[in-house]
Amino acid sequence: MKAIRRFTVRPVLPDTLRPLTTLARNLRWSWHEPTRELFDAVDPAQGRTSDPVRLLGSVSAARLAALAADQEFLARLRAAAEDLDHYLHAPRWYQEQSGDLPASVAYFSPEFGVTAALPQYSGGLGILAGDHLKAASDLGVPLVGVGLLYRHGYFRQSLSREGWQQEHYPVLDPGELPVTQLRENDGTPARVTLALPGGRSLHAHIWTAQVGRVPLLMLDSDVEENAPAEREVTDRLYGGGSEHRLLQEMLLGIGGVRAVRTFCRLTGTPAPEVFHTNEGHAGFLGLERIRELQERGGLDFGAALETVRAGTVFTTHTPVPAGIDRFERSLVARHLGEDAELPGVDTGRILALGDETPLGGEPGLFNMAAMGLRLAQRANGVSTLHGAVSREMFAGLWPGFDPDEVPITSVTNGVHAPTWTAPEAARGAEGADDRQLWELRRTLREQLVTEVRERLRASWRQRGAGAAELGWTDSVLDPDVLTIGFARRVPSYKRLTLMLRDPDRLRALLLHPERPVQLVVAGKAHPADHGGKRLVQELVRFADDPRVRHRIVFLPDYGMAMARTLYPGCDVWLNNPLRPLEACGTSGMKAALNGCLNLSVLDGWWDEWFEPDFGWAIPTADGAATDEERRDDLEAAALYELIERRVAPRFYDRGEDGVPARWTEMVRRTLTDLGPKVLADRMVGEYVERLYAPAALAHRALVPDTARDLADWKSRVRGAWPKVAIDHIQIGELGEDLADAELGTTTAVRVRVTLGELRPDDVEVQALAGRVSPDDALVDARVCALKPAGGPDLEGRWPYEGSLVLDRTGPFGCTVRVLPSHPLLASAAELGLVTLPVEATGEGAGVLMR
């Protein structure tokens, strides 16, 4: 029989133990080792606890009574409670900064990986979001996280006897999670409501998880007033069809803004000045804010759009168009039109925000990333390389500009050190000599071996094996053998099975008589990705081979709990994606914090920070002439070669004391030089200084009248721009021969520009100069603003003048252009308007000097 209703019975703690509830309900325990150790002492018989809320619900009354009388435990409890109180209320980095920083920032993400006890994540995007919240808390940044509470989370993974991935969706009871329901002042549950087509409604309750100083609001559609289909909107992460996904993203974006407003009203939290959209899933938040400004602020769509843009930051995480959510325009129009959620907001203007045709897309589709970029004045990729890839990918939204001028910057991801660094590594690495460092690495490797054996036995039991079949698992892996880790989601571009490209060569590496290698592999394929599932099965079948199964293992159900042992216990972290499809790839960062060396394709963050002291770069077979099969063959061969000739020999090259001095030096350099770069504290600090602070200032500047003026100015400029033209260019003085110009020469630039209905205050005229490529494209061009040199001539052409310094030798060229100019623009490319010389005439074309 199945229960018709589910509820949670909570324990009643003695008064002296009440602080345990506060400590358990604040997820700081997940990265604060003293608090974790305190909960371990609550009931040592249960072992290392991964969920204090569940722990407190299972402790016997006798044990609670004993703890209430244990003066030593009570002293530790008081110290932990006082420490948390100080952490929550004392000034931190943010409070010590000069300048007028935002009073509050709302951070929206479809998933958050804070702790295994709150399984609301699938992979890197969610883990990054969780680390963002934790680092913001540590720094004192006044962030409010916004997401969804999925009743099944992401799936749990197991394997069939044949090695095929199987998915399970356990029900998550909010009463057993470290969350609290947000309630109105009268005690009733706070909720938000969205209107759906046909007079239906989507209601959602709001749950709050406290991530240190940062509240994380999560919307839950499992509400009795909802119809069955609406109750299932937040059933699972990345599940369901197109309409189901659209409703999830409407609830996250539109409902999320309403949840933030409700939370601020009930708690007194300052209203956010900046809204940060972590990927396009939450992009509808901008539409809700436009609706608010139209209804309550009296602004029209254009002025409301400018106000929203000024205070919005958009972070893209995908380097390929296929990674972007896209919906049928008719589906979006039906759900956001007059008969549904956003009556009064021009549906045509909404659909235009998601138009992907400038990107070479389909006219019938609504692109969430395109909308996200159009609704945000500031945007970024998540590594330097990914920023460049994003500028290329989205350049169509800024026609006429070279990709390097597209206004998408980059903030390289980071990871939260207290979450991902093993306590032993945090305590033992600093000041350790070579022998101590080597012994620490072996200790961590030994812990990994122990956990791998336990997990492998559990996996085989799930696959149907009996105890009598599993004796071999006692000798799986060796704590003295070079251990390589590979764990991540399993889309095809991450190439889980590249290591299997030449099975015989891999076997030889694993079974080498003097320098053996062992591999620990984990990862989940999306439930609908049958190609990914086949890759998992291929890997599992290889690992099942009795000849090598003591040297290679696949561990199902990869998640945060497994990762906390996996990263520290590996000697080398392997990453072999198709370059440049890994936007950042933070797993190698987490490994590096524990002294694990990286062996990776130069993609994402590794392209940016690779040094031979930190690991090895796998050569890539780039180029259009290389087909997929040959590329994989070449890169797999390079991988084998690196392991066989460079990685393994260095690991096994021991001195008389048995310590590999060159290896431990690489470990030390990874910890001391690379470690500080990969921190989430650094990442969040960059967001504050480079994106949040400027966005807050821009938002404050757009009071209603200013927003209207800016919207009117943009409309006027767009209407008048077709008549803007460059009519005459003169480089140098008349008769001057620039063919033999010398380095350091200054030359005059004079142009005449037709502005039509615009005035000089509306534009900026620029000269650009730099080296030229063989196809006459300017490379690394320097920009020089030209100044008006008088009034218009009889034909209405305005004269501009300036000078260029010929500061580089070799082929040199220059050109001129006209751009819109306004003090409230964040970038000269913001409107996507530019006028260049007419290339058909020699007089109007750019000038080359060879």
Image: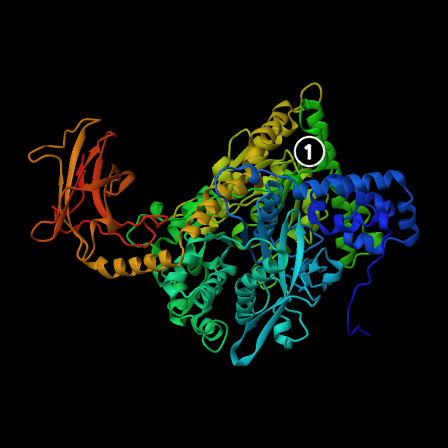
Residue type at mark 1 is Ala
Q: Where is residue 747 in the image (x, y as percent from the top left)?
A: 16, 32
Q: Quadrant of the C terminus?
A: top left
**What is the count of numbered marks?**
1
Q: Quarter of the image holding residue 661?
A: top right
Q: Where is residue 439 in the image (x, y as percent from the top left)?
A: 72, 28
Neighbourhood count class around disc 1 (C-alpha, 10 Å): few under 14, some 14–19, many 20 upward: some
Picture colour scheme: rainbow
Kindly identify which residue carries mark 1: 426
Per the image, label 1 sits on a secondary structure element best described as: helix
Q: Quadrant of the N terminus?
A: bottom right
The one nearer the camera, 693 or 500, is 693
Q: Position of residue 164 (x, y in %)?
A: 66, 60
Determine whether 671 is above or below 624 in the image: above
Determine whether 521 is above or below 279 in the image: above
Q: Is residue 590 visible?
A: yes
Q: Quarter of the image holding residue 453?
A: top right
For image coordinates 90% across by 42% down, the residue present is 70
> Position of 19 compared to 68: left or right?
left
> Position of 88 compared to 51: left or right?
left
Determine whether 110 is above or below 415 in the image: below
The one nearer the camera, 629 or 47, is 47
For image coordinates 18% across by 49% down, the residue present is 837
Q: Can residue 565 be seen in this view?
A: no
